[in-house]
Amino acid sequence: MKNLILGSFLAGLALFFWGFIYYGISGIPYKTLETPAATAPAALKSSFPSNGTYIVPSPTAENMAELQEAGPVAMVHIRPEGVGSLGTMMGTGFVHGEVYCFLLALILQQICKKSGYGERVWFVTQVGMAGAFAARFGDAIWFWQSWSWQISNFVYSAISAAIAGAILAKFIKSPVKS
């Protein structure tokens, strides 16, 4: 159990720093985004007054198919009052990474009982990539999010899984010598 917790913590810490490098320093994903009009914040607040996720056109509209084909289509995630401090978001993100790595470690501990280091790394990488593929590309297909944004986030997630795997595989070992 000590190895599970320590490995998860170190892997989560590594992902936190990897996220800072990928999003904060390189800015690669943000290069895929368009710049909204200066009037967008006011228009968003008047069109979407409360916290939530909105789909345009509404999935409950009788003529949704026609409206969807005619456009525009959008999925808007909005918090009109803002999201609070960057510190709170960073702390929550850190906890998210820790829990993600702990769940990966639990899977690894149960599945890879008789495997070498490289096999354990590859296993965690594949699990992470499968989840990223389902989530990122599903959002591009089903919720019209841009492919360039989702591909850049898939790359981040795939590399994150490999980083987590490289660390977790050092701590979650086969009880049988491989």
Image: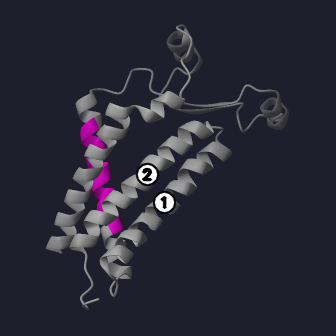
Q: Which residue is mark 1?
A: 129
Q: How many marks?
A: 2
In the image, residue 171 sits, relative to residue 51, either above or below, namely: below
> Label 1's element?
helix
Magenta segment: 90-104
Residue 68 percent across, percent down from the top left: 78, 33
Q: Which residue is mark 2?
A: 157
Asked if the magenta segment contains residue 58, the reply would be: no
In-image side of 86 versus 137 (left or right): left
Q: Main secondary structure of the magenta part?
A: helix
> Label 2's element?
helix
Residue 124 percent across, percent down from the top left: 39, 68
Residue 77 percent across, percent down from the top left: 52, 32
Residue 61 seen in render: yes
Given residues 42 and 115, the one toward you in this image is: 115
Whether label 2 touches label 1, CB < 8 Å: yes
Q: Give the color scheme: rainbow, by chain, secondary structure or one colour.
A: one colour
In-image side of 106 versus 155 (left or right): left
Residue drawn at x 56%, y 22% is 34
